Image: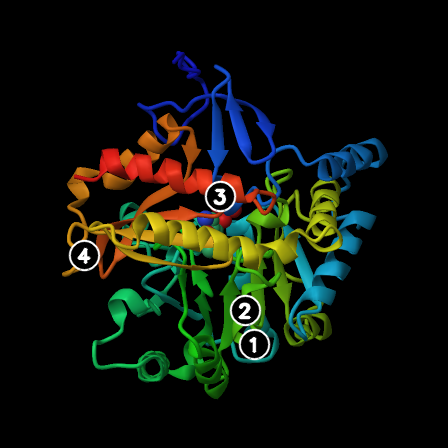
Amino acid sequence: MTLARPAASHVFHRHLRNLPETAVGGDGPWLIDAAGRRYLDASGGAAVSALGHNDAHVIGAIKAQLDRLPFAHTGFFTSQPAEDLARRLSGLAPPGLDHVYLVSGGSEAVESALKLARQYFLEIGQPARRRIIARRQSYHGNTLGALAAGGNLWRRAPFEPLLMEVSHVSPCYAYRGMAPDEDEAAYVARLADELDQTIRDLGPESVAAFIAEPVVGATAGAVPAVAGYLKAMRQVCDRHGVLLILDEVMCGMGRTGPLFACAHDDVVPDLLTVAKALGAGYQPLGATLVHRRIHDAIEGGSGFFQHGHTYMGHPTACAAGGAVLDRLLDDGLLARVPGMGRTLRRILDHHFADHPQVGDIRGRGLFLGLELVADRKTKQPFDPALGIAAKVKKTALANGLICYPMSGTIDGQRGDHILLAPPFIMTDSDLEEIGQRLHTTLASVLP
Ligand code: PMP
């Protein structure tokens, strides 16, 4: 097969010695490279391409906006697409999240949330509240503030000491974290106690916010919180006047079934971040949904949020976001997610439920993960030196499959998982094809 890699590149690639193929086209859930090879996109890149790769409605909306007005700087103007998108998102969001800060991606959305939390406490006269608490198993972005919040050890390590003071608590990770003699309620109570104690140890008057992903994505491969966990965390935060930030950059915008993943748990955060499927890859787009309490404190206080980016509220990106919402809601794609998720889960169970090196199959909706282990009984992860995740990625690509294998953080060490987050437009036979190709891939990679 002809390789479609550039022979030499002036793009500063992530993997400097292993350049990727060149993508040239999209056809529904398929990506096509310069050699004409087709790849079934089972992870939407990194949970981005929820509508596949050539959605006519979204592309049409972008073209129409470009003809009208590509860009106007928010220091001078607002735009109709930004106003429309913010109005629609806040109307769909949990109650109270009335305002939407529109940015260009997930890290920017998280940075905005962290700074909004900080400024909120300045506005209401609690300037000592600047500490953030996050979880050891989390990824919140690669900019330095978001990186400081995240708990992914190998992403953090080269840049320590990081800019912000962040304390980390245990994740909600039933597969490894729940004790054998514990039920979910006892596990939740233990995790709530840990957060409560951490806040007390730091001094509640110094803590601004607790941040968590409702379903953990890149660090662990679609780990949903157990029932009652987010509610318990919300209660602990409320007890101490700490804000709750839910990071739905990966798991939001319908990926787990409802538009916002926190709806599963009936929890309303103070700040909610989304990105990825918000623009679905058609434009770079992210958003921080802000509770009216925070907005009103700043509006009634200094009247100015000390933050901003050149491309915030970008009209063309917002037009794309509006068109994505049309597809999800008006065209019924969102309603397909739970059923498709059950089908994909059945397929994964069929191929891997008894696989000796698949320790756990988990997730919610079309956000599913497989944890790979050297020993299913002891749950011993593979030796990181084996580079299992990297091999899975390469072999899957050779088999015409895009999945998202990662070496994440498991109990303080590295461990391998595969994340699946397919476009909502797939057919049942596409989902079957994912199972087949992943089966072939793991058969040749796992020792
Ligand atoms: N938060 C979460 C939960 C994410 O999964 C990611 C990206 N994987 C980010 C934040 C950062 O988003 P971006 O890469 O768009 O900056």
In the depicted view, which residue is nearer to us: 186 or 10?
186
Q: CA distance from mark 3 to mark 4?
A: 26 Å
Q: Callout 4, which amino acid? A: Arg
Q: Secondary structure beneath disc 3?
A: helix
Contact? badges 1 and 2 (CB < 8 Å): yes
**Quarter where residue 182 is shown:** bottom left
List x then y, in percent, for residue 41.
Answer: 49, 36
Q: Is residue 93 left or right of residue 397?
A: right
Q: Which residue: 21% across, 81% down?
A: 181
Q: CA distance from mark 4 to mark 1?
A: 34 Å
Mark 4 = which residue?
376
Q: In this rendering, does residue 112 appear at all? A: no
Q: Residues within 10 Å of mark 2 (few under 14, many from 20)?
A: many
Q: Callout 1, which amino acid? A: Asp
Q: Which mark is residue 266?
A: 1
Q: Which mark is residue 317?
A: none
Mark 3 = which residue?
431
Q: Secondary structure beneath disc 1?
A: loop
